[in-house]
Image: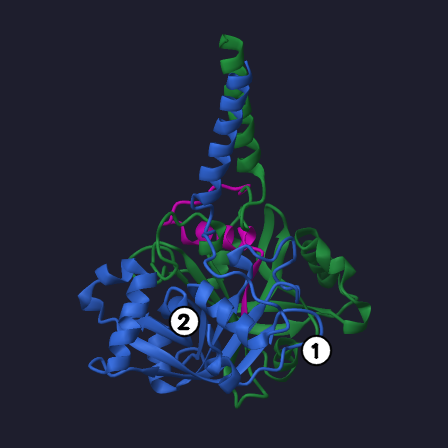
Chain colours: A blue, B green
Amino acid sequence: MKTKGLYCFRTFLLVLFFLGFQDCVQGRLLAVSKPDRDDAAAYARWLVSQNTWGILNTLSSELEGAPFGNVVSFSDGLPDKGTGIPYFYLTTLDPTARNALKDQRSSLTISEYPLGTCGKADPESPVCAKITFTGSLGLLDAKSKEAEFAQTALFTKHPEMKGWPKSHNFQIFKLEIKDIFMINWFGGPKPLTVEQYLDYKM
Amino acid sequence: MKTKGLYCFRTFLLVLFFLGFQDCVQGRLLAVSKPDRDDAAAYARWLVSQNTWGILNTLSSELEGAPFGNVVSFSDGLPDKGTGIPYFYLTTLDPTARNALKDQRSSLTISEYPLGTCGKADPESPVCAKITFTGSLGLLDAKSKEAEFAQTALFTKHPEMKGWPKSHNFQIFKLEIKDIFMINWFGGPKPLTVEQYLDYKM
């Protein structure tokens, strides 16, 4: 009987183990633990390296200059080797790439909420971090070393991209960051320069 | 022994049951099933009613007119009684509300990805729906019937808002939709007019 009880307990643990590790909604194992919220550079780099998508905002050439947000996937490097620089794989079939080729002003906004690490906080709460990078969205020279690096970074985090139709002419874009707005606690945006952000070693 | 086996199986089922119903990442039980992807109005209204947050984009008066995205919570009505019109609870301590008061041009972008209903599709894939509403972000008169309705809609979906500091002077904003861009399958954006979207009965 003791053995049966133990067997049952083991089954229970096994179920917990496998359920904990399965893909649940979009949850995934976070490879790097959440940094101290007072270390702004560490927190920002963590948010960027752990997230795989965000909203890329451009100025709409078709809608009277309105700010146009679009859901995009990005990568800042290989998993756990992020550079902090967001790269994108975009096609001019989509307004975002078309807008950027006319006016590079853009921003990328990322939320901590989908990572599932905000506890019960509301997505708008300062307790659930949000970051906006404002800068220039530029097309990379397809033959450059940086484009080669960016493509590996993108395809590693987004394997589906490898199979996207050649006829859609996807190209690699980079956000050159000029300003960082991050809120990850009460008290307004955390002071963080682009240099502090990029120089941080993960 | 059969009883023990049954007991063990019941424990197993109980564990599955509770794990399935707990808050997992940001997953939650979806009250309304996902509509047919060819019914553009139904799909768009479903996306808006089921999501509770998105990226609200304004033109930055502080960053040379750049498009500035910000993570915000919204509500379009009581759960399962959505109107399709997104309402927000914003403070001018944040750039988004300040920008909107200077230039109303804005957009709200919502992804299906965090709902967990995209299967294994990449967030940028057309299989995982994305919607952008472009229009005017305006402040509601706090004493109007619409503001009263919007506050109830917001506080019901975001109970935390009730306790947000009075000193921050949160106010209710509304996005008056002028254009809809939705991709929810291959073949480019789905044709959908604002009238078709708003007139749809859920």
Residue A25 vs residue B145, the one in the foreground: A25
Residues at marks 2 and 1 touching, judged by CB atoms closer than 8 Å? no
Chain letter behind tag 2: A
Give x and y (percent) for residue B76: 61, 56
Answer above or below: position of A23 versus B198. Answer: above
Residue A120 vs residue B117, the one in the foreground: A120
Give x and y (percent) for residue A36: 61, 68
Of all residues, the one furthest to the front in this rendering is A2
Residue neighbourhood size for the residue with mark 2, other residues' Cα within 10 Å, grouped as few (<14), some (14–19), many (≥20): some
In-image side of B16 versus A165 (left or right): right
Chain letter behind tag 1: B
Answer above or below: position of B53 versus B70. Answer: above
Q: Bounds of the magenta span?
A: B30-57
> Residue A75 is drawn in which quadrant?
bottom left
Tag in front: 2 or 1:
2
Determine if the magenta segment contains residue B33. Answer: yes
Element at badge 2? strand
Give x and y (percent) for residue A78: 35, 67
The residue singled out by tag 2 in the image is A82
Q: Which mark is residue B93?
A: 1
Identified by mark 1, the residue type is: Leu
Answer above or below: position of A63 versus A21. Answer: below
Determine if the magenta segment contains residue B93. Answer: no
Give x and y (percent) for residue A35: 57, 66
